[in-house]
């Protein structure tokens, strides 16, 4: 996917690079929010995106920060800024690509999951969210406002993050599911574990992002 279907998303005074792939007949588009230090080139997110295409879903992977912004370490953990960027990218999809908000889902990893949940709280028509190894605790005060069906996927060996996810899960009032991938660590590097994430995410989005 990298190098193909490249887009530039204008947000305030910056332009953010991305990869947009919307196969013909797609039921919805999943917008990815990567974790700190990552980008649209994330091999894990690109792997998941490729799998989502097999479920009839489009994908948008984009840089939440410019290269210059990313050089300031604190920006990577500025969840408010990351949330603003995600909301703006969603509006761009809606305005420039004609994709209705109800057919947009968010896939967030690590700190990106907090931005995804905060964005979903601000835009209640978002169709679904999925968190992979997410720092969902960083969105704790917004969780009660999330109405989108939300799936938390956590590695069974990622004990600290798993506990944070369980605490955050209890705060959700929407349709929800917590999926623990046995034997997986935080980065899902173990054989078969990232495939498990991609499959469960694909099933979740495919069942939620449908035409009205």
Image (cartoon, helix red, strand yellow):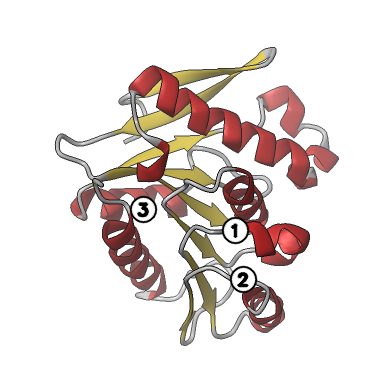
Name the residue beneath numbered marker 2: 172
Q: Position of residue 41 (x, y in %)?
A: 48, 39
* Residue 164 drawn above or below residue 75: below
**Mark 2–mark 3 distance (CA, rounded to whole Å):** 28 Å
Residue denoted by label 3: 47
Q: Secondary structure at mark 2?
A: loop
Number of on-image labels: 3
Point 33% across, 58% down: residue: 208
Q: Is residue 206 left or right of residue 104?
A: left
Q: Is residue 135 visible?
A: no
Q: Is residue 97 left or right of residue 210?
A: right
Q: How far across and down, in percent of the image, does residue 157 sit?
A: 59, 84
Say which quarter of the image contains residue 168.
bottom right
The quadrant in which the N terminus is found is top left
Identify the residue position indicated by label 1 in the image.
146
Q: Count neighbours of disc 3 (C-alpha within 10 A) and say few if under 14, some if 14 to 19, many if 20 or more.
A: some
Q: CA distance from mark 3 to mark 1?
A: 27 Å
Answer left or right for 61 relative to 24: right
Q: CA distance from mark 2 to mark 1?
A: 7 Å
Which residue is more in the foreground, 112 or 142?
Answer: 142
In this view, 15 is above or below 146 = above
Q: Are marks 2 and 1 in contact (CB under 8 Å)?
A: yes
At x 32%, y 24%, the residue is 5
Horizontal relation, residue 141 to residue 89: left or right: right
- What kind of element bears circle 3? helix
Q: Percent x, y for residue 32?
A: 48, 45
């Amino acid at each position: 996917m990298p190098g193909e279907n490249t887009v530039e998303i204008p947000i305030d005074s910056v332009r953010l690079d991305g990869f947009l792939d919307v196969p013909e007949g797609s039921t919805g588009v999943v917008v990815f929010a990567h974790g700190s230090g990552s980008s649209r080139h994330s091999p894990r997110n690109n792997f998941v995106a490729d799998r989502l295409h097999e479920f009839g879903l489009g994908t948008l992977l984009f840089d939440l920060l410019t290269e210059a912004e990313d050089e300031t370490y604190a920006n990577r953990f500025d969840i408010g800024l990351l949330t603003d960027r995600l909301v703006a990218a969603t509006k761009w999809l809606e305005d420039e690509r004609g994709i209705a908000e109800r057919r947009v889902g968010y896939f967030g990893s690590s700190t990106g999951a907090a931005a995804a949940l905060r964005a979903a709280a601000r835009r209640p028509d978002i169709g679904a969210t999925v968190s992979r190894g997410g720092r969902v605790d960083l969105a704790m005060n917004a969780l009660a406002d999330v109405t989108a069906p939300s799936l938390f996927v956590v590695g069974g060996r990622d004990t600290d993050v798993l506990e944070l996810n369980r605490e955050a899960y209890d705060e959700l009032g929407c349709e929800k599911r917590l999926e623990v991938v046995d034997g997986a660590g935080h980065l899902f590097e173990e054989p078969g574990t990232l495939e498990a994430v991609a499959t469960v995410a694909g099933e979740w989005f495919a069942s939620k992002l449908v035409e009205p």
